[in-house]
Image: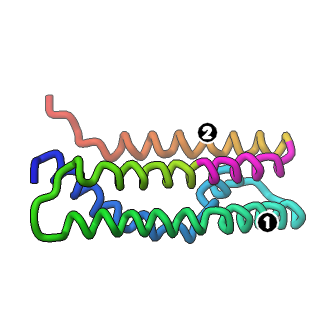
Amino acid sequence: MRPTTMALAAALIALSGVAGAQSGYGHHHQDELFQGVSLTDAQRDQVHQIEHAGWTQARSTMQQVRSVHEQIMSRLLAPGSVSEADLAPLVQQEQALRAQIDQQRLAAALQMRQVLTPDQLAQAAAKHQQLESLHDQEHQLMQPASAE
């Protein structure tokens, strides 16, 4: 295999668990949108309904991603030569399906955002900013000390 194809293979193998991570559909957006915000029971119910509808809509697409991913892996692991050109149509198909899932998640996140009141949205934005600041601090702390 050429180095580029080997890099692609390594990336695909590393991502092989990603297609199985769909059980958390929508939760990432919910966590970011609602961190530090108290929701009413009605709001929680609305968010749950949005997540359920999103998951139901995305389930078929996620199954297609797994199927295409498995085809890629089968070709990568099969005896004989394989080239980027051999895999390109499948990689493009998988990327298109993942983009479709991303669009579905974005649509769900926008619906969830509409559940928040302006005050709750401001609280969420403030918490998000605080968390970003903490992540920046953590990143700075984890940098090796410069040798001067």
Compared across the picture, whether 81 is left or right of 108 comes to: left
Q: Residues within 10 Å of mark 1 (few under 14, many from 20)?
A: few
* Residue displayed at 21% across by 64% down: 76
Residue assigned mark 2: 129
Which range of residues does the magenta coloring cover? 103-117
Q: Residue 11 location, x and y as percent?
A: 27, 55
Report the side of 135 relative to 59 (left or right). Answer: left
Vertical arrangement, residue 36 with respect to residue 69, above or below? above
Along the line of sight, the residue nearer the viewer: 62 or 120? 62
Q: Is residue 115 magenta?
A: yes
Lateral position of residue 124 relative to residue 8, left or right: right
Front residue of this view, candidates 111 and 97: 97
Q: Nearer the viewer, mark 2 or mark 1?
A: 1
| Callout 2: SS | helix
**Residue 34 placement (x, y as % from top left):** 71, 54
Q: Which residue is mark 1?
A: 49
The amino acid on which the numbered mark 2 sits, given as a three-letter code, is Gln
- Callout 1 secondary element: helix
Q: Residue at x 53, y 39 (%)?
A: 133
The verdict on residue 45 being magenta is no
Q: Position of residue 140 (x, y in %)?
A: 37, 40
Return the x and y of residue 119 as percentages of the image width and height: 84, 42
